[in-house]
Image (spheres, coloured by chain):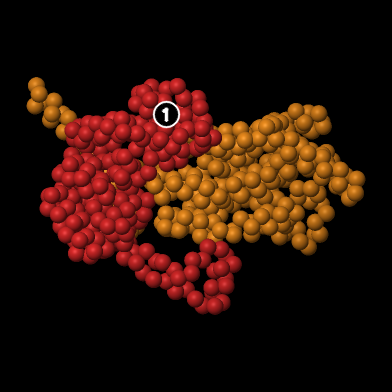
Chain colours: A red, B orange
């Protein structure tokens, strides 16, 4: 209830922006000794050792993404890209700052989340569809399309544990793409399956872009970011180093990389 | 015509965006659903809850040869053992002692199995916590629901036995679903606390196993309540599970009406456990994705 009050107090949201991130910060506490049992906690209490280090994953990050924009996030490993994406997806809570998402979100942090090896392809489509926020009726109406896109019609009744990893990923992508989101959060999952399926995927992504959907991509593939994105940001050590035109930002990123090596 | 279309499109789009607006802040995620009450998630995610529940049951019964039959054989065999021990060795004078034990065991199994499987429900599906946002209590809810369905099936098997052993069946048996629904919330509330704590304390299942063992003998499951020493009785009946099992027996075996005081006590305990469960779960849920 308190939560609802909070959202009402916010000033009228600007609907031109799909994602509004304001002063976002996130800290992780990394204990020197990871305690995961009651016994260890009790032992720790007696010994009095509760020391931990604070790691700033994100420091005061602000940016906006407009509706219909393809937005890239680049940066070296451990720069906070994934943390940012997880906060946007709602998996992690920020320590301070706010994130506003204006639209239906489809997080593609990992494909095939919740797939069960002991279920058949058909059952997994319904399960994964439900996890991605589709109703049973929606999945049923798209069912043939999903199997056709994945090219797995023959294996409809086969258990997932007998699938190759490529087949499973194809099934996941085909299902996930049916969520018809306004905002797509993508974490380097575009490269799935063999080459022909990859082409099919990038065509689909292009289709989604042209349909005016917002896409946020976190990637190491600078070439792809350059090709797809209209704007991008470069994050390092949890802060935005540069933002704007991809060509400029990527050049900046490359310069930072080479100056370190 | 074309411009009209695009204006309409824009309007519709804006409406949609408001519908799905989400604000995330240190205080949590607030899906901006218009008129979104506290229990909106139940409607929004009902397909998912049901799907996860069915998946749980499917996997459970698929992996064993006898499948579903096991879940029915198990309490029957256990009753046989306990009946033999307690009827021949201890010799209690309890009317319908076989049924008495069976009802106790089936009721207890829901609590024992329900809490110990639901406790693991968050940790067992880490990708649903760290890779996508769904309200996490859905995992606990669907796990509890699947044990609940198993428990209902076990009680269904009991019905012919009630006739065979000559229980006094009266219309009061129709109160049974109400009692079982109350029991569901007791188990769900407990499971919320346990599942949330288990994410942080991974040896909790060992501790809980002992508690469950202890509870088995602290509730009148395999002995009549009359053998409890009178000076302990006031404390003994504080246990909601004791009241619940006795209520089940009254409805199913002895054909007695529900006691107003015990029903009120059960409703209050279930509500209290749910409130505590929700509170603890919401508190601990924030860092699930970091520690899982």
Residue that numbered label 1 is attached to? A136
Q: Nearer the viewer, residue A232 or B222?
A: A232
Identify the residue shown where x is 14% and y is 54%. A251
Q: Nearer the viewer, residue A116 or B251?
A: A116
Q: Residues within 10 Å of mark 1 (few under 14, many from 20)?
A: some
Identify the residue shown where x is 42% and y is 54%. B289
| Number of marks | 1
Could you say where residue A127 lies in the image, as x and y percent from the top left?
45, 34
Q: Quadrant of residue A15?
A: top left
Point out the residue furthest to the bottom here: A47
- Split into 4 quadrants, where in the image is the C terminus of chain A? bottom left
Could you say where residue B24 lies in the image, as x and y percent from the top left?
30, 52
Could you say where residue A136 lies in the image, as x and y percent from the top left?
42, 29
Could you say where residue A146 lies in the image, as x and y percent from the top left?
37, 27
Position of B147 relative to A35 (above/below): above
Q: Image check: B258 left or right of A54? A: right
Residue A13 in view, yes or no: no
Identify the residue shown where x is 31% and y is 65%. A56
Identify the residue shown where x is 46% and y is 25%. A155
Residue B280 in view, yes or no: yes
Mark 1 falls within which chain?
A: A
Point out the residue furthest to the front here: A261
Position of A37 relative to A115 (above/below): below
**Secondary structure found at label 1:** helix
Q: Quadrant of residue A76?
A: bottom left
Q: Image check: B88 left or right of A89? A: right
């Amino acid at each position: 209830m308190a939560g609802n009050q909070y959202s009402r107090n916010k000033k009228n949201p600007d609907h031109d922006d799909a994602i509004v991130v304001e002063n976002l910060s996130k800290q992780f506490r990394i204990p020197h000794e990871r305690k995961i049992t009651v016994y260890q906690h009790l032992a720790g209490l007696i010994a009095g050792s509760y020391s931990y280090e604070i790691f700033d994953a994100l420091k005061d990050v602000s940016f906006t993404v407009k509706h219909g924009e393809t937005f890239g996030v680049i940066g070296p490993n451990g720069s906070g890209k994934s943390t940012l994406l997880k906060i946007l997806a709602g998996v992690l809570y920020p320590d301070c700052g706010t994130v506003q998402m204006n639209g239906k979100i489809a997080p593609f942090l990992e494909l095939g989340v919740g797939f069960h090896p002991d279920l058949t392809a058909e059952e997994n489509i319904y399960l994964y569809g439900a996890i991605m926020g589709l109703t049973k009726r929606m999945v049923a109406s798209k069912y043939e399309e999903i199997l056709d896109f994945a090219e797995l019609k023959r294996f409809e009744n086969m258990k997932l544990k007998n699938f190759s990893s490529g087949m499973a990923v194809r099934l996941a992508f085909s299902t996930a793409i049916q969520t018809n989101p306004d905002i797509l959060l993508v974490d380097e999952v575009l490269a799935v399956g063999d080459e022909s399926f990859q082409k099919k995927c990038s065509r689909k992504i292009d289709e989604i872009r042209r349909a005016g959907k917002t896409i946020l991509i976190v990637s190491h593939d600078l070439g792809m970011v350059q090709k797809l994105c209209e704007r991008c940001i470069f994050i390092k050590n949890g802060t935005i180093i540069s933002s704007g035109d991809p060509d400029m930002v990527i050049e900046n990123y490359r310069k930072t990389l080479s100056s370190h090596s | 015509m074309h411009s009209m279309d695009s204006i309409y499109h824009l309007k519709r789009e804006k409406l949609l965006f408001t519908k799905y607006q989400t604000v995330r802040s240190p205080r949590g995620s607030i899906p901006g659903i218009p008129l979104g009450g506290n229990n909106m998630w139940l409607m929004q995610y009902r397909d998912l809850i049901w799907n996860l529940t069915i998946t749980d049951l499917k996997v459970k019964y698929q992996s064993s040869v006898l499948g579903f039959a096991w879940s029915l054989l198990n309490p029957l065999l256990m009753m046989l053992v306990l009946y033999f021990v307690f009827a021949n060795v201890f010799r209690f004078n309890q009317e319908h002692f076989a049924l008495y034990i069976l009802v106790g065991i089936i009721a207890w199994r829901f609590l024992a199995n329900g809490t110990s499987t639901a406790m693991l429900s968050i940790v067992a599906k880490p990708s649903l916590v760290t890779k996508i946002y769904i309200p996490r209590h859905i995992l606990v809810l669907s796990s509890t629901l699947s044990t609940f369905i198993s428990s209902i099936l076990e009680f269904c098997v009991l019905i012919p036995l009630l006739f065979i052993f000559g229980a006094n069946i009266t219309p009061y048996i129709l109160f049974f679903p109400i009692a079982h629904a109350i029991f569901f919330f007791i188990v769900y509330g407990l499971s919320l606390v346990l599942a949330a704590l288990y994410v942080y304390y991974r040896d909790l299942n060992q501790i809980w196993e002992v508690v469950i063992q202890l509870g088995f003998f602290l509730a009148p499951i395999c002995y009549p309540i009359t053998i409890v020493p009178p000076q302990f009785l006031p404390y003994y009946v504080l246990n909601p599970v004791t009241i619940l099992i006795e209520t089940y027996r009254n409805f199913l075996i002895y054909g007695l009406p529900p006691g107003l005081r015990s029903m009120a006590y059960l409703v209050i305990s279930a509500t209290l456990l749910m409130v505590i469960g929700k509170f603890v779960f919401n508190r601990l849920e924030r860092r699930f994705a970091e520690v899982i």
